[in-house]
Amino acid sequence: MRKASFIMAMLALFSGLAFAGELEYFQVYKPQAGMSADEIMQIEYFVKYTKFAHDVKMGGKAYFIDKAGSVREKETARLRITLGRKSDDIAYEDLVMFTSPQVRGLATLTWTYMDPKRQQDSWLWVPSLKKIRKISNANSDDSFMGSDFTVEDILTRRFEDETYTLLREENFRGYNCEFDKKTYYKDTPCVVIEAKPKKSPWYYSKRVLWVDKNTGGGIYEEMYDPNAKMFKTLFKSFEIFNVNGKEYPAQIMLEGKDLRTGHRTVILNTDIKFDQGLSEELFTERALMQSRW
Amino acid sequence: MKKLVLLLLLCLLTGLAYADDSFQFNGYIKNELGLRTGDQNYLQKNKDIVQLAGQYNIKEDELVFFAKVKYYYDFAYIKDKLGKAAHYMEHIQRAEWLRDLYLDYNKSPWFLRLGKQQVAWGQADGITVLDRVNPPDLREYWLPDMVDIRIPLWMFNINYAPKLNSNLQLLVIPDFVESQGAPIGSPFTFRAYKIFDNTMKQYATSLWDINQHFPGRRLNHATYGLQWSDRIADTDYTLNFLYGPYSTARNTTTYIPGVPTPAGSFIVARDYKLWRVYGGSFNKTFTNPGPMQGFTLRGDFAWYNDEPTYFGDPNTGKTYGFARWDNKFWLIGMDKYIVTKWLLSFQYAQYIMEHRLEENNSFASYQQIPMNGYTYGAQDPVENIFAIKISTDFLNQRIKPELSWSFTDDAQGKVSPKLSYEINDNLLFTLGWHYFYGKDTESNGQFSHQSQVYTQLKYSF
């Protein structure tokens, strides 16, 4: 018993040390009572970018729904490997392959660096050229693949880009998803955090996030424009995957609504598989070059 | 018959695709209309295209079979206006219908692709500095996508990765197909072809003996390519070497006088000379904070050893022979998102000819001017080429406008605005315009009467 208490105390100490700086890769963290807004947001980003897992493989469907109800659909297959490697500064690498008829074969490879000030490196396989093109990163406030999410909503926003204030703890009122007409996370204990961008002026003045205490995932957020008017809501549902005795929270569905245009985007992640032993060779230009479509 | 068998095979694969995850297929049906906007309006193109591609994973990702076929028919060529070129343009050539047929073997560190395919080298967009492995099909000039311009070849494509993010590629290409140009009577017939055709008509009473000498099926006439790709710091680079027959034949014409004059014989030898390309490419995105952050810089360099180049008198459009010079071609490109979602690309290229007059020959110096292979116009010793592209999107990427403008320092070029609209998940509509300007003796200028408004309607499945 004494030994167990000692181990618990050591774990708590290491946990505290981890929060003093960067979180350690390949660990699962959950919000704890008494944590600051910064500590909770570090976990939120950790969950968002699946830094707890060595790799992840998933399919994806994106639905673009306009105000009149017209729906367009895009399908993708995604791979990610987490490296957290200081020697070459690479945090993780992503490969997104489009499988919808119109854009079949289009694929992007992205390397994200540990240095928060450093932009990502991206390569694009262009089927109409049969060539790899190194691409200039789109601006962070650009739409991500034509969706209602911005590039930084999905890929580039980092913990260091904002300042955080813990507003309150409360049970979430529930989210009525327009896509499947279900209500999600009703009465789920959450921490409500206000995030303000360090960039000014920027396309939003603040985000208000509801972070699920059980998973550390940001389940809902409201975005406000520079005039303090809410212009966008983003919802994410999570599911826990048991992988080798660890509990991995994974994003299952994302719904983004632009309140100005009435346009919505729903992204469904399917067939999620963690820690499959993906090789880093899949995340190279040579692998992109092997594209057949 | 072979075509039919392959098409049936692909249809079978398509059917099986529904039943088994090992099979995947994709394809499209497309209509392309082109309306000439010059002094006479007529349909330059009314082309219906069907493309079907299928993939079968024989052993997961380790052994994969892939095939792609394309069939088209251009209804514009049944009209009188283009009737003369009909046979040639309707003909489904070997180069056209079978786009890909290969077997992939992928087991680290090896990757082999064996069969008919295309290989693209270099970082240039639409300018073929290093992209010289496959010959171009220029029957519609450089207007189609590069994937449709390159003529696929049968080859061994062998890759070995000695370390992560590097690759050594060896190409052995026993196949040879010459590059294609539009025939006489087509909208995009090169001026050089017209001049040669007029000469033949002028001397119609003479015998024209055209001897085309294709490269022999020998190892020393095969094409060999070597590419080393690697990364230093955060800059990707390649080193390239290509050796083989030049994709366009060069004519040598000898006149044997006959009696009575002008009867006689013109002996035309069409030879495909061997040449070498030494070169390299690089690209780098500036990721660290600073004034260059967000810029992508890319470039190609090639030294063409023994490139066959015509010389002659551009004023009369008459060639007197060809020289084999060592020419250089380099390009630098930059890409950057400016403002929100507006992508600006800029390319600058320089083609530098050796421009060495032949020694000990009987031609006057004005008859030894280097000539553009497409137009027989005078070729500048240093040709400066510029290309600008601006693109963006609206309505959640449903509408995509793009403007591209390519030009040289000879006041000639091509401006191509276009607008794509995604009608639904499978249907894409494109409206565009190709506007050519410049003198007849310039590459783009020769088509200044062939400017074209076009539409494309593509159904993908």
Image: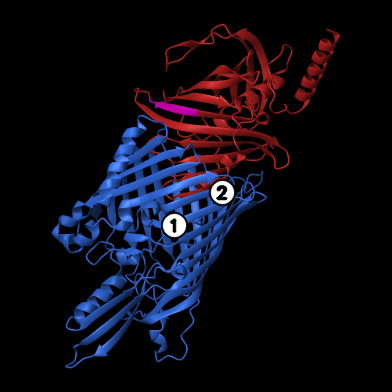
Chain colours: A red, B blue
Q: Residue furthest bottom?
A: B259
Which residue corresponds to the image point at 61% horizontal and 34% vertical from the top-left? A81
Q: x and y percent of residue A161 in the render?
A: 65, 31
Please state the horizontal and vertical placement of residue B153, each as a whole percent of the image: 40, 57
Mark 2 neighbour density, 10 Å: few (under 14) some (14–19) many (20 or more):
some
The kind of residue tagged 2 is: Trp
- The residue that label 1 is drawn on is B155
Which residue, given by chain and number where applicable, does mark 2 sit on?
B110
In this picture, residue B211 sits left or right of residue A170: left
Q: Residue B2 in the image: x percent, y percent?
A: 27, 51
Q: Amino acid at mark 1?
A: Met
Q: Nearer the viewer, residue B231 or B71?
A: B71
Label 1: which secondary element: strand
Query: Mark 2–mark 1 contact, CB under 8 Å?
Result: no
Same subunit, labels 2 and 1: the answer reads yes
Q: Residue at point 29% right, 39% down?
A: B11
Image point 23% across, 76% down: which residue? Answer: B198
Does any portion of residue A4 appear in the rendered image? yes
Toward the viewer: B224 or A165?
Answer: B224
Q: Chain of mark 2?
A: B
Residue B182 lies left or right of residue B25; in this view the side is left
Residue B8 drawn in magenta: no
Q: Quick one: label 2 or label 1, which is nearer the N terminus? A: 2
